[in-house]
Amino acid sequence: MLVIAHRGASGHAPENTLASFRRAVEMGARAVEFDVHRTLDGELVVAHDDDLRRCGGDRRALRRLRWKGEADRIDVGSWFDPKFSGERLPRLADVFDAVPPSVEMHVELKHGSRVYPGIERAVVDFLRGEASGRRVIVSSFDHRALFSVRELDSNVRIGYLLGLTRAATAWREMSELSAESLNLSLRQASARLLRAARERGFKTLVYTVNTPMDRDRLARSGVDGIFSNYPELDLWR
Ligand code: G3P
Ligand code: MG
């Protein structure tokens, strides 16, 4: 079972920062996950929330901030520990630069074009250009965004984040999308749903799994991967 470092090694370093991705790599992570937004001037940036209130003490929405001189100034490390005060909001390209190509990249689009018009094309262009040859899976709770990504690129690997969608809808959309995996929360990961996904030929990836007990239970249920803040849960490192 694959352990995917959720927002990097976010149990050890501030989430979605270069420090957390470097830490994950040092710890032997075979895959990392991170969340993507876009600034006012079109930079693709890596953060979980729509703003940096929680991780940077700044209430302004990322979509209203310019990258240069605004978003790039915000300290996104101190909230976790003062020793990370040098951490700045990374761009998507910075994260790809910090992580070696052997590591699988789970790129989660927090919003599609409804919030960030044209973001799907920007991401696909980046993946085909600067990031070509890298091992990438694009995922989102915004299934419209996944359809746009699929329309733009018939080869990209897609992870379908279930969210509040009904299983019947998910199966239909996942096959239309040729999705590779159903990504679901620990709470949603019933034996029945996992079996149903497997029977339809989809992998299952479960978030966020931070204890050996949950890891072992999911491994026994045949789950293909877990997103964890603790890459050390991967026994195969
Ligand atoms: O992609 C798995 C997981 O990251 C989804 O939830 O809120 O942590 O982005 P969240
Ligand atoms: Mg995520």
Image (cartoon, rainbow, N blue to C red):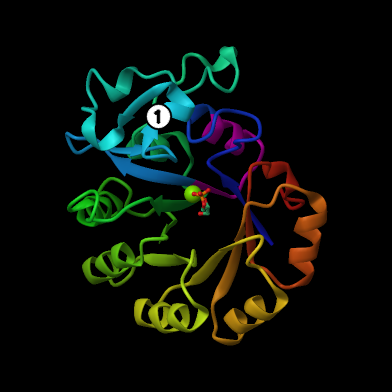
Name the residue at 39% across, 79% down: 173
| Location of residue 237 in the rendering, given as x and y in whole percent from the top left corner | 71, 47
Q: Report the amino acid beneath label 1.
A: Leu
The N terminus - image quarter: bottom right
Q: Quadrant of the rendered structure where residue 207 is?
A: bottom right
Say whether residue 226 is left or right of residue 58: right
Task: Please give left or right for residue 16 compared with residue 44 in the image.
Answer: right
Queried whether the magenta region covers residue 23, the answer comes back as yes
Question: Which residue is at 45% across, 77% downward?
Answer: 170
Q: Is mark 1 within 8 Å of ligand 1?
A: no
Measured as percent of width and height from the top left, residue 111 is found at 32, 52
Decide: is 111 above or below 18.
Answer: below
Mark 1 lies on residue: 52
Residue at image coords 66%, 60%: 186
Apparent side of residue 41 relative to residue 159 in the rendered image (left or right):
left
- Tell me which corner region of the image, top left, top right, bottom left or bottom right, holds residue 27: top right
Circle 1 — which element?
A: strand
Number of disc labels: 1
Numbered range of the magenta stretch:
20-33
Pinpoint residue 123: horizontal percent, then vertical percent: 27, 51
**Which class describes the residues within 10 Å of circle 1: few (<14), some (14-19), or many (20+)?**
many
Indicate yes or no whether the magenta region holds residue 199: no
63 is higher (above) or lower (below) than 118: above
Placement of 58 over or under 194, stated as above or below: above
Q: Quadrant of residue 184?
A: bottom right
Q: Residue at x 23, y 56 (%)?
A: 114
Which percent across, then down, holds residue 181? 51, 70
